[in-house]
Image (cartoon, rainbow, N blue to C red):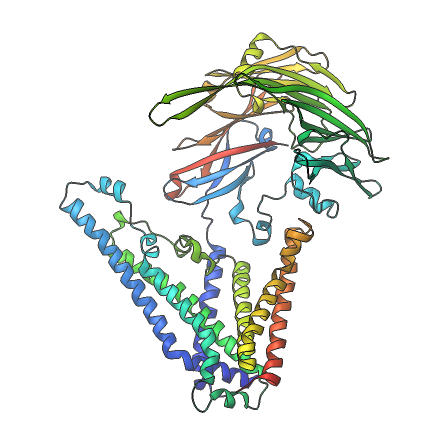
Amino acid sequence: MNIKRYWKLISILAVIVVVLTTYFIQSSLAASRYPNFVLKTISGDKSEVENITMYGEYYQLDSTSSGYLRLTSEGTEYLQEQSYFERLNNKFEPSEITRLQDEYRNFMRSKPDLPALYFEDDNVVAYANLESEERWGTIYPEDYYFDIAVFDKKTNDTSSFEIEIPGQKDYWYMNVYDVQVVDGMLKVVTDVFHQDGETEEHTLSVYTFDIATQKLVGDETVLTGIGEESEGVMKRTSFTLLNDADFIGIQTNLFLMKEESTETIIQSKENESTDVDTEVIEDQVTNRQVYVYNLATNEMTELALSDEIKTQIENTPFNSTAFIDEEYAYFNLRTEENLTVVGYNIETLTEEMKQTFDLANLGITNPTIRIKNNNVYLVESQLEDENSVEVIVGDLLTGDILYEGEIVIENPTKEQKNYGLQLYEIEIK
Amino acid sequence: MMRYIKLVNFELGRFLKIYLVLVGLTLVLQLLGVFLEANGYLGEVEELVVNGNLTQEQFLHDYGYFSFNDVSRSGWFIVPILFCILTLMIYVFFIWYRDWVGKNTFAYRLLMLPTARINVFYAKATAIFLMVLGLVSLQLVYLPIENSVLRMMVPSDFRIDMTVDQILNGFDNLRVIFPTSLIQFIINYGIGFTAVFVLFTAILFERSFRWKGIILGLIFGAVAVVVFISPILVQAFVLPEFFYPMELFILVVITGLIVLAGTIWTSNFLLNKKIRV
């Protein structure tokens, strides 16, 4: 074979092989273009923050560079820097849902990845969701039915069934809040809107299914409220589940808030020349009540709140600042400088705990608050400029600060100095 | 095997002149782009800082630093790339039709060579692949050259230096041509080259059945697309969200290989039994 005759083929091949190999070796060795955020301890024990996972976004202020990150005491991972196959899911792994998908692959098939729809304990993995079919010829939009599946961990059997919801001829809209299993009974916490003539009825119901017989055995109405309009004033009732619905483990006590509000439509004909009506809607909360509902006993109790808390919760959007665990229901009261956490004992329904933390002194202004295991976790939700993000862990039983730390970039480069960081989700395991 | 290599070399040689024009034109126009964009920026510096009353800080605040992004987002940089893409896309057709042009059709000699006719098909496809990858590689060589010209022209106080990777990240839509991960590269170019195979088969349908062949070729192309994306269609319409992402990926790789095998088998059949010279 005469090599010279093939110089065209050989030279183009050589260029391709040399350049592309160099390119891919270089890009695999290249330093990350994202900064490495670390949690730096200022005081306290690092083990206090080992169970915190923070999700957020990093962005460079003077360019379009940005990345989604997951930060733990171990360090930072970026969604953009996961391998090609990890990125197929386009979310951080492992999460609770991807763990379920790995362990119960066929059971989890075709099911949406919303943690609120799942429950898991030592015996079962349960799933419940509302499905609907168009209901032709009526003004009501859909026929709702429950789609239920339960995986028995002991026998590896899956039982799945669909159950039509009885008496739903005037149901407008339904939504699942949470799923729990108590003593072989599947409980689905559901938000329902009915339409009864002019008035709208809103209920929070707990549907109970017997897993063994696959039958609907109970339909408990937990909260009801009316929505109606008269003389330009719209009354509304809404319910909020204050539990962490995304937690798929056992939560026997539901922590519920009922909110009544009015919307007043004020019509004003300010602009005579164009003849356009301007509508101003005035929103006002008239009442907020808080309840604890026990799924095992179907007992509901209203929490008798002190005036201080009552005033606070009626004046602030507070669904992100109330928590419940097996012992206590917690409320957070914010003032300019302080954060006060009040804990009600669920059994005795009395205020048993009250701790105040001096936020100004801790250097934290707008924290995301989480409560778990009698600890309060405070993480500054965003940063601009060169401030660092504060992370504080406080003990609710003693009022002590267990941990104080800050999130900073490890060895920042010249370009990485000018950045923003927003933390929008804090998970405590 | 030897026949195939000879044919590839031959096909490369036939397009070499135009190819070298593409290679040279890209470098010249992109360097011109660096020169003109940098000169324009330095002109503003001259006018406003040296002769005007702006301080360097004020100028940088209002006009920003100069970086390779200013070059790579200008027409001088992108137009030659688009021109190369367009030329090669036209040549995907012309690489076949040139053999049928003229009095003594060259296709006759080509198909009468003492080798399997499918080798002609493979050789033409390989030539296209090599020319595409060659241009991609040369662009990766051009970038550092253009980058150093930029550095020589603009003083460091007024510029932000970028690595090749940062430059490519600024490309947005062109990033598909230069993926960072090897797997993404194989996927992108795998799909591209499969599309070239399908187009070749459609061209052979036309060469075999002329007018009727155009319709057959279009049908073949449509079937290929449907087969290739069939797992995604099933996921969307028949079994909603049934497959996990990894399973879907494997299924699409399988259907992609089926399409590839289908085009080769069909082309082999057409070349051996139906082709008209």
Which residue is outermost to the top? A307
Q: Is residue A65 left or right of residue B247?
A: left
Q: How many badges with numbers are in the image?
A: 0
Q: Is residue B109 above or below residue A138?
A: below
Q: Could you say where residue B67 lies in the image, as x and y percent from the top left?
A: 32, 51
Q: Is residue B139 left or right of residue B36?
A: right
Q: Could you say where residue A252 lies in the image, as x and y percent from the top left?
A: 73, 25
Which of the pair B227/B192 is nearer the observer?
Answer: B227
Which of the pair B83/B217 is nearer the observer?
Answer: B217
Q: Is residue B216 left or right of residue A249?
A: left
Q: Could you say where residue A72 lies in the image, as x and y percent from the top left?
A: 56, 37
Which residue is outermost to the left? B51
Q: Could you say where residue B149 lies in the image, as x and y percent from the top left?
A: 28, 60
Q: Is residue A194 above or below residue A19?
A: above
Q: Residue B4 appears in which quarter of the rendering?
A: bottom right
**Quadrant of the drawing holding the C terminus of chain A:** top right
Q: Is residue A100 above or below residue B235?
A: above
Which of the pair A14/A153 is nearer the observer?
Answer: A153
| Residue at left offset 58%, top offset 8% | A307
**Is any atom of residue A404 visible in this view?**
no
| Residue at left offset 61%, top offset 60% | B229
Q: Is residue B246 left or right of residue A313?
A: right
| Residue at left offset 71%, top offset 36% | A143
Q: Residue B98 appears in which quarter of the rendering?
A: bottom left
Q: Is residue B51 above or below residue B5?
A: above
**Is any atom of residue B82 visible in this view?**
yes
